[in-house]
Each structure stands twice: as C-alpha cells, then as structure tokens.
Image: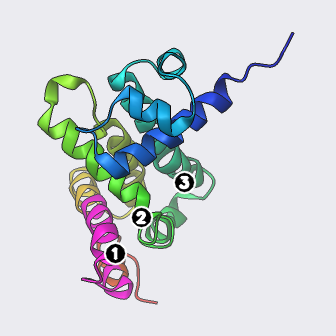
C-alpha cells in the first residue's frame, strides 16, 4: 500500500492559505487564489481542505497546535510552582512577544473575520480558552479561583497586545515583562 500524501498536501495548502491571507486578507481570499499559490488545482484544494470555512477552521487548528497545545504540553512537563515562570517565558519571551510577525497578521485577520461574521462558525475563542486555562492553573497556587480567572484574562490580553505593539516599537520587551511578572505574582529578578 502506498503511503498517503494527504498530510503533506494539506500542510502545503495551509501554507499557501496563510500567505494569501497575509496578502489579500480573508475578504479577498478565494479557493482559486489558494490553488494558484499552492500549485494545486481548485479541486485538490477542496478535496484536501474543503470550502473556505473548512480551510479557515483547519488553519485555526494549526495555530491552536502552534500556541495552545505547545503551552499545554510545556506546562504539564513542569511542577505547578514553576508554571508562572513558564508563562512569563513563553508568553512574554521569544515564543509570543518575539513571535513570527506573519502569525500576528493572520491571527488578526482571523479574529476580525470571526468578529464581523459571527454566524460563520469561525472562532479563535477555543484556542484562547485553552491558553487561559493554562494561565489560570499556573496562578492557582497564589490566587483564589475567581481572581486567577480574572488575572489570566488580563495576562492573555497583555500577551496578545504586546506582541503587536512590540512590532511597532511602542513598548519595550523589558516593560512588558516587568508588568507581566507582577501580574503573575513573580518576584523581581
């Protein structure tokens, strides 16, 4: 039996999809543009990833794996008392704060599309909820449950916004990290 090429083809099409979103946004996205960028026919694009909504959902899965799954796995690998430091390192270090700028562009487009098309079924909320759960759990040894949940939302908002603001040189990494450290109840270095 021949090995399947489906995972490789899907990855190639998803890379083309990301490039198209960065160039034309979601409003300008068509299966034809993705096909041209990927080098596959429209039929192949639809076969491997379905229609536009299916493609966007598959792309959100990629970002969920890249950010939420990775953070969940890392958090599980360290003792609970070390998770706040891990959150600081991951969300306010190279992984997010200095992340791939092209990811920020695509995530911003996906968030805008989901907000302006609430009936589309497209949402990054499940990915962010998973990240919030990791932050909330990391804060649980030092904060009451309600306070941990509230603080987790602020920390995630800071991480999301700081990533974009750093690209514009409107905030320094040191300032963001100092504020994140305080929110995470970590001692000064």
Q: CA distance from mark 1 to mark 2?
A: 8 Å
Q: Residues within 10 Å of mark 1 (few under 14, many from 20)?
A: some
Characterize the magenta stretch by its predominant secondary structure: helix
* Label 3 residue SS: helix
Q: Residue beneath label 3, please?
A: 75
Read off the magenta span: 155-176
* Label 2 residue SS: helix
How far across and down, in percent of the image, does residue 169 sit?
30, 83
Q: Residue beneath label 2, please?
A: 101
| Residue 157 in the figure: left or right of residue 52 | left
Label disc, if present, on residue 167 of the rendered structure: 1
The reply to whether discs 1 and 2 touch (Cβ–Cβ < 8 Å) is yes
| Residue 184 in the figure: left or right of residue 11 | left
Q: Residue at x 36, y 58 (%)?
A: 104
Q: Residue at x 26, y 65 (%)?
A: 161
Residue reaching furthest to the bottom: 189
| Residue 10 in the figure: left or right of residue 62 | right
Q: Residues within 10 Å of mark 2 (few under 14, many from 20)?
A: some
How far across and down, in percent of the image, does residue 91 sit?
42, 65
- Label 1 or label 2, whichever comes before in sequence order: 2
Where is 176 relative to 159, above or below? below
- Label 1 or label 3, whichever comes before in sequence order: 3
Q: Residue at x 58, y 49 (%)?
A: 76
Is there any visible trace of residue 140 in the rendered image?
no
């Amino acid at each position: 039996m021949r090995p399947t090429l489906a995972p490789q083809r899907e990855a190639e099409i998803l890379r083309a999809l990301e490039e198209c979103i960065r160039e034309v946004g979601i409003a300008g996205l068509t299966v034809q543009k993705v096909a041209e960028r990927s080098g596959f026919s429209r039929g192949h694009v639809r076969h491997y990833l379905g229609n536009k909504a299916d493609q966007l959902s598959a792309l959100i899965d990629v970002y969920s794996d890249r950010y939420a799954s990775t953070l969940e796995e890392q958090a599980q690998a360290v003792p609970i008392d070390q998770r706040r430091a891990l959150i600081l390192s991951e969300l306010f270090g190279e992984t997010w704060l200095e992340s791939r700028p092209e990811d920020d562009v695509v995530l911003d487009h996906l968030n805008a599309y989901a907000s302006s098309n609430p009936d589309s079924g497209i949402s990054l909320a499940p990915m962010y909820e998973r990240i919030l759960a990791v932050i909330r759990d990391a804060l649980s040894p030092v904060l009451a449950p309600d306070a941990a949940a509230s603080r987790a939302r602020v920390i995630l908002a800071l991480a999301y916004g700081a990533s974009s603001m750093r690209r514009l040189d409107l905030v320094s990494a040191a300032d963001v990290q100092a504020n994140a450290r305080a929110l995470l109840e970590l001692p000064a270095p």
